[in-house]
Amino acid sequence: MLMRGLLLLLLVPLVASADVVPTGRYGGVPTLSGCGTSPTLGADSFDSGGSINVGTGIVTACTLNFFNSGSFWTNPPKCHVQARSGTIAAFVAAPPTISALSIGISASLPGGVIDYLCW
């Protein structure tokens, strides 16, 4: 019993200082701009996370406009993005605001998919 309590005591500071990432879907459904011709969002996409189906054409940037001008976020969120391609990288191009997430793409990704998560 003492050993279990000691282990818990040692782990608490690590958990308390880490960023907590939500596991559910939060906010409204965002919109897209500059993501190629006719981009779409994955069916279960919300402000807090989802997928972007990149449109056609030369696509090296994309903006995710949070629902209702960011009414969900009280502070700018932290976000992570990732392309589902092994050779092309997607990255957060500028610090997210309460209104939008700017995504950069290392090479053109027409028809590709980018996953995002914000918390």
Image: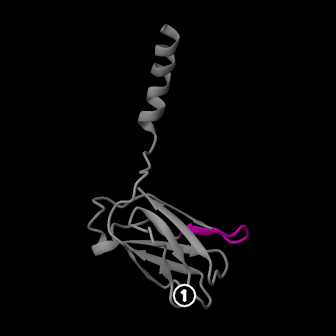
Residue at point 38%, 66% (across, down) = 47
Disc 1 marks a residue whose amino acid type is Gly
Magenta-span inclusion, residue 95: no
Residue 17: quarter of image:
top left
Residue 56, placed above or below residue 48? below
Residue at point 46%, 40% (across, down) = 18
- Residue 53 vs residue 72: left or right? right
Predominant secondary structure in magenta? loop
Q: Nearer the viewer, residue 20 or 40?
A: 40
From the image, which quarter does the C terminus lie in? bottom left
- Residue 70 vs residue 8: left or right? left
View extreme (right): residue: 87
Crowd band around label 1 with a 10 angstrom C-alpha radius: few (<14), some (14–19), many (20+): many
Q: Residue 55: x and y, percent? A: 56, 86
Residue 9, placed above or below residue 51? above
Q: Which residues are magenta?
A: 84-92
Residue 98, placed above or below residue 5? below
Residue labelled with disc 1? 36
Residue at point 38%, 74% (across, down) = 30
Residue 91: quarter of image:
bottom right
- Residue 107 vs residue 102: left or right? right
Residue at point 49%, 73% (across, down) = 42
Q: Residue 85: x and y, percent? A: 68, 70
View extreme (top): residue: 2
Q: How many marks?
A: 1
Residue 102, placed above or below residue 1? below
Q: Residue 88: x and y, percent? A: 69, 72
Residue 64: quarter of image:
bottom left
Q: Give the structural element (helix, strand or loop) at label 1.
A: loop
